[in-house]
Structure formats: structure tokens, C-alpha cells
Image (spheres, rainbow, N blue to C red):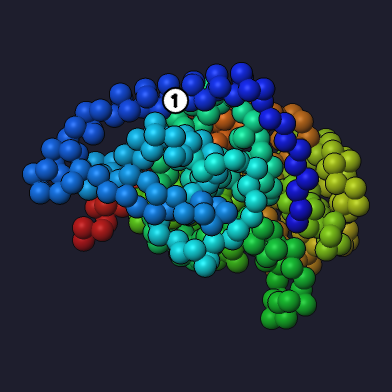
Amino acid sequence: MSFNLTTSSPEPGEATVRKALRFCVALILVATLLPVFSVNCVLALLCFKAPLKRLTWIDISAQPVRLYCWQAGLFKRSAAILNVLGGTIRLVGNPLVRDGVSIPVIRRFHSPCSSPGLFDSLWLYSLTGLSVKAPLALLQQQRDQSVFADTCLVIKVMLCLCLYRKSASMPSHSELFGIPFSNTRMQTAVDWIVQGAQQQPLQSACRAAYYINVNSVNLSAVNARLYQALQSSDRNFIDGSGMRIAARQAGMGLADNNNGTDMLPALCEAAVERKRSLFLLGAQPGVAEQAASNLRQQYPGLHIASVHHGYFDDDEQVCNTINQSGADIVLVALGSPRQEIWIDNNKHKLQAQCALAVGGLFDFFSGNIARAPMWMRELGLEWIWRLIQEPRAKFNRYVLGNPIFLFRVYVLQQALRGF
């Protein structure tokens, strides 16, 4: 994959102003952290240690960077702000490889950022699980942004560190709340969905895959049939910031946030490349048709075999329609728990290779509902946008459901570990 990036350098006067403003932002951070710095100095002296030491980090082009670190106290890496004031590193810039990654395993490439930084967009996306298809393009956008945008990036990373900081343990398969899941990158998940039947010779039924989010956990706790369906699926993908919080509390780190809305573009591209066809099942009459039309325009060559709305009672007739269409992948948007239970009840009747439960996906791609602004998605707050759009419909799911879920994460799960 190659990226053709054109860069434009700011005028000398503008560059000086930007440098001065960034220095002021770093100075404000130092002033804010001054109480922490003071405590760390005292604790180090009490332990008969020098307050600061230098650690060698590596930037993404495999160049060593020497940064200050506190020998004792809280937020030990915050001492690197002093390097920003000294001019050896920028506040926002070239990504650093963290947690002791050795030089030989670093993937080197020429970054558009001129110098390393304490904060970067790739780090933010990693914390919230946003898939990055073009990392160089993302860094180019970061390079050209204003001082205000730099400051916002720093704030967003710090907030996400508090909520979603990854654990050192990142298993490829695990479980949360008794529900198994696959901890994969977005592209790996897409590859599994579009793989052909010849790659699974023992597979007799259509494979079932679900997206596990806060609502799924809450519903499965009171719906035994849904819980059974989630446990017997072929693949479960983790979706949403709430699940990242739960994984962190369980001592696990998560890879990409594999929600259906972000996955569908990659799935359509893979379907065109691998010559796979889709069937859209669900939503109100006309919505799936509009979504199919939009997707065909956006992805030339995409074969959508047929569509069917979600208002039906005859499962047998719908399964026959899907089979007659010859679709390879069925996207089922019937809402939870109906969609998961429907797939579990009917997958043995389907001749498709894979069926996905995709919730309100068609509403987004039909244009009926707009997605949240990027800054909200970067913070894992897209659920707030959905609540604003449909306050009555989403009240139980988010206003009541989220506190219940957090109770399960921080109280019930801890109580179970105590036994």
C-alpha cells in the first residue's frame, strides 16, 4: 500500500507563532502538574534517589528518543513534558513505540511528521479501538492541524487513557460475562467473514457472527435464549467503549472496535475483491433498498443479491428467499435480541456462508440517521449521539442500561472473583 502525500510548509512567521503557542500549552501542562512534580521530587529524595532519570524510547521511524521519567511517585512519564519545554521533542508529533518494544521488531516508515511527539493520533485511535486504514494519511492530517487541534488531541488522549488504557494481556480469544469473543483487528474479522466454504470443508451450516456490546450483555442477563445464541455462535466481535472498560477491568486489552458500522465499508471492499454477494434483511420497508442503492453507488462492482424488510412472520419463506438469491453473506438487522435468536434458529436452513447480526446498520447507510461527529467517536462517546437523536427510543438502552452495565463490571464481577 502506498500513500501519495503532499506537504506544505507554513510561512516562517507562522511557524514561529505556532512554536510559541505550543510552548505555552506545554508550560500550562507543567503548571497544572506542578503539585504532582513536587510530590514526586520529595518521594524520590526520601528514597535517596535522583528525582529524574532518562529512558530511551523509539519513534516510529526507529530513531531513539531520550525522555525524562520520574524515579518515584505518580504519573512517572509526565516528566517528559520537561523535554517538550527543552525542545527535544514536540507535544504532538511522530508516534513513539511504547512499553519496551525493541528496535528490530519496529516497522519503519517515513512519517510526514518532522519530529517525535508525546501524543499522536495513532495512539488515540489505538486506545478507543478505531481501525486505521491509512496511518500515513492520518499523521499527515495531524501534521497540518492547528495548535488548538493539537491541544484537543492531548486532552482526548488523556481522557482515553483514564477510560481505556490497555492491559499488557491481549488474548486472541477470551470471554466477558461468560460470552466468548474474538479479539481481532478489523481486517482479520472481515477476512473471516468473506472466506469461502472451501476454506471450511467441515462447515455444514451458515456461520453465525454477532457484535457484543453493552446492550447485548444487559439483554443476555435476562434472556436465556439470547445468552445461548451468543455462546453458540461461530464468532463474536467486541463493539463499544463499555466493553473496553469491562475488558480493562478484567485485565485484558482489546484490539480494534469491531462494530458493524465501521466494518461494513471494509466488508464491501472485500466482497467486491473476493466476488461475494450480500443479502440485506431487516429494518422498515424501503430502508434496506435505499441502503443497498447507496452501497452499490459507493462500491462499484458490489453484488447485493436482494433485500427484505424486517416485518415478517414466516421464517421459512424468508430463508427460501435468501437461498434463492444465492447470497454469500446475510446482514440481519432485526434489532437485538430478535436478530441473534433468528440467526441461531435458522442458520441451519441458510445456504449462505455467513450471517451477521447488524442492528441499526441499514439506517446509517440509507441516510436516515447520521453518524456521530468524529471527535465523539474518537472518545468512544457515539452512544451519546444516538441518545440525542432518539431520546425516547434509546432511553432504556443508555440512560438505564449503562449504569446497570457498570454495576455488573465494578460490583458483580468483582464479587464473583471473591468467591
Tell which of 348 and 1 is nearer to you: 1
Residue drawn at 31 percent across, 25 percent down: 32
Relative horizontal placement of residue 197, taking residue 303 as reference (left or right)? left
Which residue is farthest front?
12
Up-down: is 93 above or below 228? above
Residue drawn at 52 percent across, 54 percent down: 63
Residue drawn at 20 percent across, 43 percent down: 51
Circle 1 — which element?
helix
Up-down: is 133 above or below 22? below
Relative horizontal placement of residue 353, taking residue 24 as reference (left or right)? right
Please identify the quadrant where the N terminus is shown: bottom right
Tell which of 307 and 413 is nearer to you: 413
Q: Position of residue 99 (x, y in %)?
A: 40, 56
Up-down: is 379 above or below 343? above
Q: Position of residue 410 (x, y in %)?
A: 30, 45
Q: Quadrant of residue 73?
A: top left
Residue drawn at 33 percent across, 44 percent down: 68
Up-down: is 181 above or below 30? below
For residue 412, say whether it is visible: no
For residue 186, say whether it is visible: yes
Please identify the quadrant where the C terminus is shown: bottom left
Instruction: Identify the residue position indicated by label 1 in the image.
Output: 23
Q: Rate crowding at label 1 as few (under 14), some (14 to 19) or many (20 or more) other CA atoms within 10 Å.
A: some
Relative horizontal placement of residue 278, taking residue 400 as reference (left or right)? right
Could you tell me the amino acid type at mark 1? Phe
Q: Position of residue 248 (x, y in %)?
A: 38, 51
